[in-house]
Image: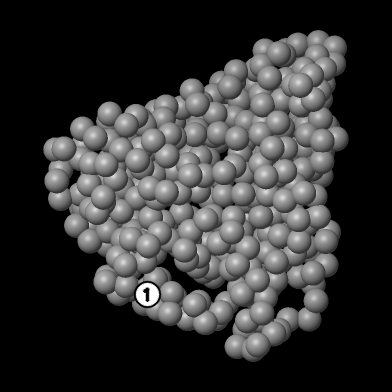
Amino acid sequence: MLLFTPGPTPVSEEIRLEMAKPTIHHRTSEFEAYFAQAQKKLKELLKMPEVLMLASSGSGAMEACVLGLCSKKLLSINSGKFGERFGKIAKAYAIENVEIKNNWDTPVSVEEVLDILQKNPEIDALSIQVCESAGGLRHPVEEVARAVKNFNPDIMVIVDAITAMGVEEIDVIHIDALIGGSQKAFMLPPGMSIIGLSQKGIQKVEQRNIGFYFNLKTELKNQRANTTAWTAPTTLVIGLVKYFEQVESIGGIQTIYAHTKKRAIATQSALVSIGMKIYPKKPALAMTTIFNETYASDIRKVLKSDFDVNVAGGQDELKTSILRINHMGIIAINEALWVVNAIELALDKLGIRKFDGQANIVFLQNYFA
């Protein structure tokens, strides 16, 4: 079965074998060496002065960042389930929250953000996704972050990059917290989140010094010494070191970025050529999302039962009307081709469109353009 859901992504055999070695204790020099190597590579990837690894899903890192960086009022961008989640986190901690809510296919605009900031001078943090994975939308994060910092440099910019970290280069110059997760482009099992912090972000969490398990000041102190405040996700850290070794073996992270972009554009072009509709107005590179109210669920079922391809559906009102196809991680071109061919064959089986190999042709033309 080819796993093409936008998280969790497949774990390569190389990484599985590395993680299958005997477990080591997290309070040892042996593990500290792995931790130091993983942290070094993450800092190089994110280009941020501090990077934390937490034993939690990405939602844990989202909670930690809201708690550690917002003390007055949060402005959250909601174009899907994960933007909505930031607002729910604020509510759980009785932090005031103002929300910009758009359709799941619609990115936020700089003008919308500035309008809210002008009306709410007490806002001290903004939360936003790079890729809102509920619908595969790409927000203009860099432009929004720049505008926020020009408006007030003390506003903390919290960015959920869980489905973008390791997929594309993100300009972090105006970002204070950048959140990632192990089960996406890093091709690891779920269970570890990542937080990159700016210098302003570091200062803020040290001043706040709030929370217990998710106290980022406590984590900073410990992780600067290559350990963690609480039990570390040892196997995942070791797997992350192996992931970075794999990346280097195929030419480095820029090679990953280039291949991911080519796969995403080729897949979108191929599927449009056979009559499929791309859902978001601004698609992210991490996934391709197809909208079809009538046949989306049927296509997913045929892909899984007849062609051994597992793609994701949607949530809430989009549960049965979208398909989400992953592009994160190191994916062989033959597997990406299998998926677009399988979708075209599924359309034939369902009597929607006769198979003629068009998706395959367009994919290759775009990938090797």
User: In this view of the protein, which residue sits in the foreground, 287 or 104?
Assistant: 287
Res 271 quadrant in image: top right
Q: Residue 52, position in %: x, y?
A: 50, 67
| Residue 41 appears in the rendering | yes
User: Relative to residue 154, is residue 79 depicted above or below?
Assistant: above
| Residue 3 appears in the rendering | no
Query: Residue at 52% across / 44% down in the picture?
Result: 170
Question: What type is the residue that disc 1 sits on?
Answer: Lys
Q: Quadrant of the N terminus?
A: top right
User: In this view of the protein, which residue sits in the foreground, 48 or 285?
Assistant: 48
- Left or right of 164, for residue 78: left
Q: Residue 260, position in %: x, y?
A: 69, 38
Query: Residue at 38% across / 55% down in the picture?
Result: 176
Q: Residue 283, position in %: x, y?
A: 54, 29
User: In this view of the protein, which residue sits in the foreground, 200 or 303?
Assistant: 200
Q: Residues within 10 Å of mark 1 (few under 14, many from 20)?
A: many
Disc 1 target residue: 217
The residue lying furthest to the bottom in this view is 28
Q: Quadrant of the C terminus?
A: top right
